[in-house]
Amino acid sequence: MPFTLKTLTSKNPLGQMTPEDRNILLICLGAALVFWLILNLSRDYDINRSVEVNYLVDPERVLVGRMPEQLEAKVNGNGWNLIWESMRPGNLPVEIDVRNRDNLRLTSTDLLRQISRKLSSSKLTPELPGFESIPILTTPKEGKRVPIVSKVKLQFAEGHMALEAPVITPDSITITGATDALEGVEEWPTLGLILKDVNEDIDNIVGLEPSEEGITLSRQEVRVQLNVEAFIQEKITVPVTVENAPVDQAFEYSPKEVQLVISLPQRAFGSFRPSDFLLVADLSGHASGTSYNTVPLTLVRKPGTVVGARFSPRVVEYYLVE
């Protein structure tokens, strides 16, 4: 009987799987994952947790110096316990009670005892690498009122300026702390702020400089207000007033009037009269022994809202009349 060689063809080509095959594969992968988790999470690991230290102090006392407020703890334990611990949000809070006492030594033992109580499992062990015990001292709290100093700098837009200094509300704050810390503190500055191209009124909330070591501020920000105005120029003719003229000699002077070019708020345009200004030629020391001289002119008086004035000529000529 002749022998015939036939090619066998699989009904499932390579790369295709039946649903049963896929289920078996998923079961195997799941079992491998569970085995891997059991094997690895049974080992010990370390994670870092931030510890927030709060100090309970009598209201009439303050800490001397700056005490640590944030510490980094290393927590050791098996992977299962650390999973839950690492999922907890926020810092681990601990409290150091120094009420009714003026000194205390903060040790790692005290801190670790409190940290252990804050952990999610008693099987976790905290450590504070590099932490050394430190003394905590308190002293009676003192307070003083100091003025606020503005560090706000203004760069006005062209044609604008302010007639007065900025108004700070409140204009002073109370600072509290140890007597040594307050010594020499006579004022408190705002944060630096530069405002450019200012062409309208200012009304800003500005923070204060952060407090120095051992000092507490009664507030952290103030209000800075400033009226900003548009300024224009106006020309006004003002008579020259002669002072200290010779009483025994006749004299003449020229010019009798001078035109002022003044800078003033736009709202005040046209509201000033020549009598609001005093332009003086002082003849002291110039009237004797000479028949002709020049005397400089001085603008002695002008309204407060006029921020600048210029005039020409800057002198008058006077001569004696025989």
Image: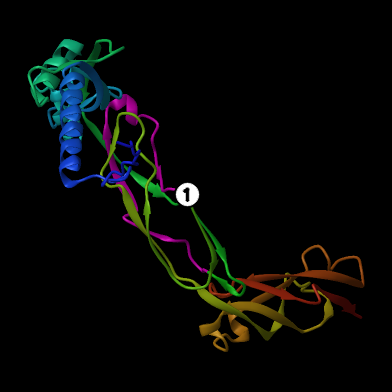
Amino acid type, residue under disc 1 in the picture: Gly
Magenta part of the protein: which range? Answer: 162-191
Using the image, determine if residue 46 lies above or below residue 155: above
x and y percentages locating residue 320 in the rendered image: 88, 77
Q: Secondary structure at mark 1?
A: loop
Q: Is residue 212 left or right of residue 176?
A: right
- Residue 56 shows in the view: no
What is the quadrant of residue 313 in the picture? bottom right
Residue furthest toward the bottom?
Answer: 270
User: Which residue is tagged 1?
Assistant: 192
Q: Is residue 292 above or below residue 177?
A: below
Residue in the image at 26% along x and 47% along y: 11
Task: Describe residue 25's horizontal placement relative to residue 316 as left or right.
Answer: left
Q: Position of residue 317 (x, y in %)?
A: 86, 76
Quarter placement of the C terminus: bottom right
Answer with left or right where residue 81 lies relative to residue 293. Answer: left
